[in-house]
Image: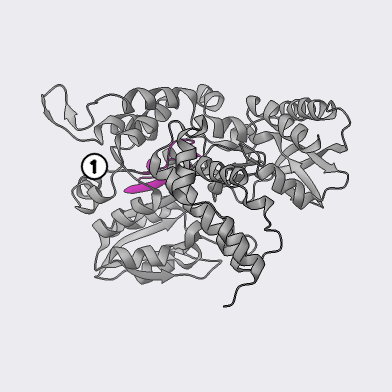
Amino acid sequence: MKLSNNQQTLLRMLPGVDLLLEQSKKDTFFEGIPNAVVVNSIRQTLDSRRNRILAADPSIDEQNLSDSRIMELVKESAAESMTPNLKSLINATGVVVHTNLGRSLVPAEVIQNLAHIAGRYSNLEYDLGAGKRGSRYGSVEDILCEISGAAAGMVVNNNAAAVLLCLETLARGKEVIVSRGELVEIGGSFRVPDVMAKSGGILKEVGTTNRTHMQDYENALAENTALMLKVHRSNYSVIGFTAEVSLKELVELGTKHGLPVMEDLGSGTFIDFSKYGLIKEPTVQESVAAGVDVVTFSGDKLLGGPQAGIIVGKKQILDRIKQNPLARALRIDKMTLAALEATLRLYRDEDHAVRRIPTLQMLTMNLNELANRATRLADDLNAISGSRLEINQVELSSKAGGGALPLLELPSKCLRIKIQGLSANKLEQNMRQNTPPIIGRIENDAYVIDPRTLLDDDLPIIRAAFEKLLN
């Protein structure tokens, strides 16, 4: 490729790596930044300019290639490299358990316990009473059994792992009976038939998509049947002409034929949400009381704790699951255990749990509190001088999120925001690129902020972001 005279001139203007590196050593901005990061930032910046020159980019001129301008770009690149990829942000979407935004927030007590355990040695696998090696499950098994009423329990790294481990232990090479209407798919393309195949279990579907009867299960029983599995449809609902066999009825059938029954609750909860005016969701305690052999559920959805897959049930079943070599590959670390134990302890007092666990507090927040928070934020934003803002408080709905409570519409008092001369998409992009990022939603060509998922210290940050945008 033949270069023009202008391109050759611009290429000759590019400073060398060594020159920029020497300049960086005299600049206090680079103090504390590793030399490898500085060198890489210099090379990336020079490569970018060089490629744009070779592409005959008309925006590249002599002014854009001055040493000072190049050094500015190097600083921007270095600063970006030194910024953690995982960063905190403000959830203004109204989706409480937002999978893309980290799911559940953990309570302050959990954060304190996590910091204390993570920074010191602990009795993770050490029995202080016996003075010898112990089990890491012991730190949470007692409290899990106390809350759920189960005889035994253990924890792995997520609920998908819990389902896989249980199926592999109880039904490898044998048939597992599941209602066709419960062959769910959750986020990340996790499907019950797929995890069944990975576990070595043989899926045996019964019933139809909308109706499954006891006779369907009875007719499917065979010599090779190892397990009956009930999957809670936590992320969708079947309505209309429907029928399903209850967990209690399935347990009775299992007892009659000497077969274990397993339930995957998905977004498990210890709280009966119907007491707070929300849709009824089956609790872990109810499943255990029904006599099910093993129950699996998530720790980071409706439970409001860290990511974990919790397994509770009968001792003889849990003993087999704990002895599976796969359990070691799926086990959780000390930080997750510390966070989960602190979360579970809050459930000893349900009222306290609802007040202290952010997920529960947000889900049960009343309209008056939401309206007050929306009004406070609206007043803050309207106070921005010379503002081009148009703000209206509107009644919209929040969501539980995380594949939980799919039919639940949580009434909320939201702010619908427009800025003269700026599209809703552009406003959303600006808020998303703020530091920290503010993630809202767009409805009817307006930017919407839902106060349900805001924390008190988010409000001044949101005001500052709008001030920066408008001034």
Q: Say which residue appears at 38% left-offset and 35% top-offset.
A: 148
Q: Position of residue 290 (x, y in %)?
A: 40, 44
Q: Indicate the position of residue 258 as horizontal and vertical percent values.
A: 25, 57
Depth check, front residue: 76 or 122: 76
For the question of whether residue 267 can be seen, the reply is: no
Q: Residue at x 70, y 29 (%)?
A: 366
Residue 423 horizontal side relative to residue 185, left or right:
right
The magenta stretch is 288-309
> Which quadrant is home to the C terminus?
top right
Q: Report the residue at 60% width, 66% height from top.
A: 8
Q: Position of residue 64 (x, y in %)?
A: 66, 51
Q: Does the rendering let one see residue 67?
A: yes
Q: Is residue 160 left or right of residue 61?
A: left
Q: Is residue 212 above or below residue 387?
A: below
Residue 259 appears at what percent x and percent y? 28, 58
Q: Main secondary structure of the magenta part?
A: loop
- Residue 196 lies in the magenta-colored region: no
Indicate the quadrant where residue 210 lies.
bottom right
Q: Residue furthest bottom?
A: 1
Q: Give the amino acid at mark 1.
A: Lys
Q: Quadrant of residue 284?
A: top left
What is the secondary structure assignment of the residue under circle 1?
Answer: helix
Mark 1 sits on what residue? Answer: 315
Nearer to me, 19 or 431: 19
Task: State which quarter of the image contains the N terminus.
Answer: bottom right
Name the residue located 47 percent from the left edge and 45 percent from the top edge.
19
- Queried whether the magenta region covers residue 290, the answer comes back as yes
As rendered, which of 233 and 109 lies closer to the eye?
109
- Colour treatment of the image: one colour
Crowding near the residue tagged with mark 1, few <14, some 14–19, many ≥20 C-alpha atoms within 10 Å: some
